[in-house]
Image (cartoon, helix red, strand yellow):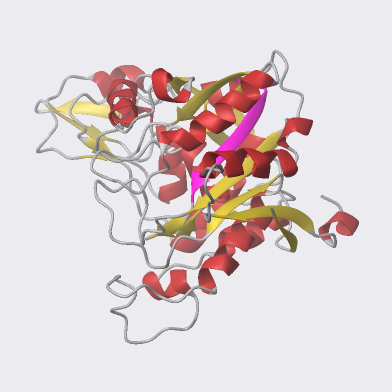
Amino acid sequence: MNQENKKQKSDVYFSTFRAVVGDSLLDKLKRLIVKAGIDKIDFKNKFTAIKIHFGEPGNLAFIRPNFARVVVDLIKEKGGKSFLTDCNTLYVGGRKNALDHIDAAYQNGFSPFSTNAHVIIADGLKGTDESIVEVKDGLYVKQAKIGRAVMDADIVISLNHFKGHELTGFGGAIKNIGMGCGSRAGKMEMHSAGKPSVDQSLCIGCGACIRICAHSAPKIVNKKSFIDKNKCVGCGRCIGVCPVDAIEGAGDESNEILNYKMAEYAAAVVRGRPSFHITLAMDISPCCDCHGENDIPIVADIGMFASFDPVAIDQACVDAVNKQPVLAGSCLAEKTHHCQDRFTDTHPTTDWKGQIEHAQKLGLGTKEYNLIEI
């Protein structure tokens, strides 16, 4: 984005969750995204990745599959071929491999019967199927590790749930495509300044880590694996292949740099092809949908947003949340001091501004926007 474009405002379209008889929220969502220009994308005979968070089993704050169906059906009307996608998690949970991940998606209602689209886990069975994408202007990431199916797609649509996050302050469009599209190794790169290590109490000495490593970093000693940090390059592929989850990333990156890396991963995902962003600001939980539970929302439901600009849509959502009163009974209501920044108040060690400002510097968009209500 050149300096002249940076001065321009991006259009962000908005619709409330108010509904009248005969006009459902699904109808409103379709009108919103069409008005925002999604139908200007040439979908005909194109593969379209709809990046969504399926929700960790036990979490109930994730986006309902009904909303995904609206996007899928519109793309089909335009002659496109879409699929719902996410990448496997770095942590041990219900979505750490493709089989468990698909089970979780179906359990939470994202079956082809309800959404009219198949689920493809972008980084494959064990989270090791990735494309290496150059980020030439990245300060922290020069080669992003992105789930291969996401990069194989011709078009990327981000359909995300806007909520708080304990590391990044909030999770919106940038996080959905940046962190969400990183393979397991990519997620480790974003979360870690160091290199993976082996929990000796869990290791069974099977040698899977040795077979996957191109640098001879893992060794078996006394029937247990350990990783030679001098040889390890931090690719994280051993994390994906360990059958007992004995290998874990360092998880020691600062929240500030994590946000910068996440923006650089988002740049790797969207550059060079059409992308569009849809955000639902509802059930605005204090923490990520990666949790196996969800606390009550910190503010009331706000509405639906749509834009071609991931930076502007995130800024618009932050501004909308910060205008809302704190919900009684929420964890935020228990705080004794409020500074009118709902996300910093909820997680004081975070700084959400970093991801927006860095994404703007990378040319992904602008935080200056025109809010157009539909």
Image location (x, y in percent) of residue 286: 36, 62
- Relative vertical location of residue 61 with respect to residue 345 in this rendering, above or below: above
Image location (x, y in percent) of residue 369: 74, 61
* Residue segment shown in magenta: 153-161
Q: Nearer the viewer, residue 86 or 26?
A: 26
Q: Confirm whether the magenta stretch covers residue 160.
A: yes
Label the magenta part by its dominant secondary structure: strand
- Relative vertical location of residue 43 with respect to residue 197 in this rendering, above or below: above
Image location (x, y in percent) of residue 135: 66, 39
Find residue 151 and report its image quarter.
top right
Task: Give the side of residue 283 with respect to residue 329, left or right.
Answer: right
Q: Is residue 214 visible?
A: no
Q: Confirm whether the magenta stretch covers residue 261.
A: no
Task: Give the side of residue 316 with respect to residue 43, left or right.
Answer: left
Please name the residue shown 33% across and 24% down the image.
Answer: 102
Please name the residue shown 70% across and 21% down the image.
Answer: 78
Q: Residue furthest right?
A: 4
Find residue 28 and report its image quarter.
top right
Image location (x, y in percent) of residue 300: 43, 65
Please name the residue shown 66% across and 27% down the image.
Answer: 155
Q: Nearer the viewer, residue 303 or 257?
A: 303
Please name the residue shown 32% across and 77% down the image.
Answer: 333
Q: Is residue 305 visible?
A: yes
Q: Residue furthest top?
A: 45
Task: Give the side of residue 105 with respect to residue 92, left or right.
Answer: right
Q: Residue furthest front?
A: 21
Q: Nearer the viewer, residue 180 or 253?
A: 180
Q: Nearer the viewer, residue 86 or 218?
A: 86
